[in-house]
Image: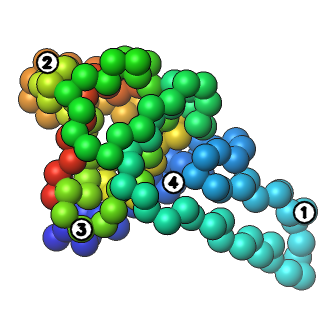
Amino acid sequence: MRTTRALVTALTVGALTLLTAPGADARGAEPAAAAPLSVTAPAVVAPAAVPAPDGFLYAWEHPHAGGFHCKWNANNGNWAGCRNKVSDVWNNGFPGRAEDVRLFYGLNWSGSWVCLHQGHSLPDLGLSGLRFFSPGAGKGQLVNDNVSSHDWVDAC
């Protein structure tokens, strides 16, 4: 079940990433050049190099790794300088125990939350339209510019 859920989530996030990524960002992905249409040979695109996990959750003020940023390798109950200012998040945590991150609407892990699985990123939260979905304050609100805290969990 976890494998199926992870695969579905990965495909969804991958599709969002492809649809919303106009250029390169800190994750090392370069945009593929548009190949002219050809009847004789399909375009071949080399996969982008993905940085190795480093144990951090990254958050940027603007989409596609733009503007001010914060990073954490442990739980944080108050995002302080990044609180309610984030439009791009990336979970580059290590696989295994405490690999997923819950992003909370409120301070100190309160209110509604959404999950960001290990290795996944949302480079444009505004365009994604992602909303907090779990019970609590903030349920139904857009995640873009509304995250106050996070914790690392084994699965969410």
CA gap, disc 2 and disc 3: 30 Å
The x and y percentages for residue 141 are: 28, 20
In this rendering, position of residue 85 left or right of residue 44: left
Mark 1, Cα crowd under 10 Å, few <14 / some 14-19 / many 20+, is few
- Whichever of labels 1 and 4 marks the residue nearer the N terminus, that label is 4
* Residue drawn 52% across the image and 40% down it: 123
Element at label 4 = helix
The x and y percentages for residue 118 are: 34, 57
- Whichever of labels 4 and 3 marks the residue nearer the N terminus, that label is 4
Q: Nearer the viewer, residue 28 or 71?
A: 71
Q: Nearer the viewer, residue 20 or 156?
A: 156
Disc 4 vs disc 3: which is toward the camera? 3
Element at label 2 = loop
- Whichever of labels 2 and 1 marks the residue nearer the N terminus, that label is 1
Q: Evaluate whether residue 16 shows in this view.
A: yes
Q: What residue type is labelled 1?
A: Pro
